[in-house]
Image (cartoon, rainbow, N blue to C red):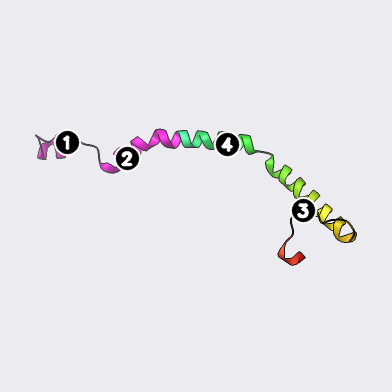
Amino acid sequence: MTSIAAEFPDVPHRYCDNHFLRDVAKPVLEADSHAKVQMRRKVRGLRTVEQAVLKQQRQSHEESLADPDSPAVGPTTPSDR
């Protein structure tokens, strides 16, 4: 650093573009990380709820297949047609 100042005495010190952008981005990255943690706290446990709903839909669909007089419940897939 001192050798650069000695070689260019009238030029003020500047940040390297990469270091400048890295330092500018730090607060954004920290805020993003915090937002991810908050989001994960909110959605934690939703996967088990989703699995329970899907299991219930499968059971209803299987029951409707076993009883041809009852209307079909739940979404149909191309293999069901």
Residue 21, labelled with which disc?
A: 2
N-terminal-most mark, 2 or 4: 2
Q: Amino acid at mark 4?
A: Met
The residue positioned 46% from the left and 33% from the top of the image is 31
Q: Nearer the viewer, residue 1 or 34?
A: 34
Q: Which residue is mark 1?
A: 2
Q: Element under label 2?
A: helix
Residue 12 picture quarter: top left
User: For the residues carrying marks 3 and 4, which lies nearer the camera in this image?
Assistant: 3
Q: Amino acid at mark 3?
A: Gly
Q: Residues under labels 2 and 4: Cα distance? A: 27 Å
Q: Amino acid at mark 1?
A: Thr
Magenta span includes 17: yes
Q: Element under label 4?
A: helix
Q: Residues under labels 1 and 4: Cα distance? A: 47 Å
Q: Which residue is mark 3?
A: 74
N-terminal-most mark, 1 or 4: 1
The rendered magenta stretch, by its main secondary structure, is classed as helix
The residue positioned 74% from the left and 48% from the top of the image is 51
Q: Nearer the viewer, residue 14 or 77?
A: 77
**Marks 3,4: beta carbons within 8 A:** no
**Marks 2,4: beta carbons within 8 A:** no
26 displayed left or right of 45: left
In the image, residue 1 sits, relative to residue 60, either above or below, namely above
Q: Residues under labels 3 and 1: Cα distance? A: 73 Å
Q: Nearer the viewer, residue 8 or 44?
A: 44
| Residue 46 % position (x, y) | 68, 41
**Marks 3,1: beta carbons within 8 A:** no
| The magenta segment | 1-30
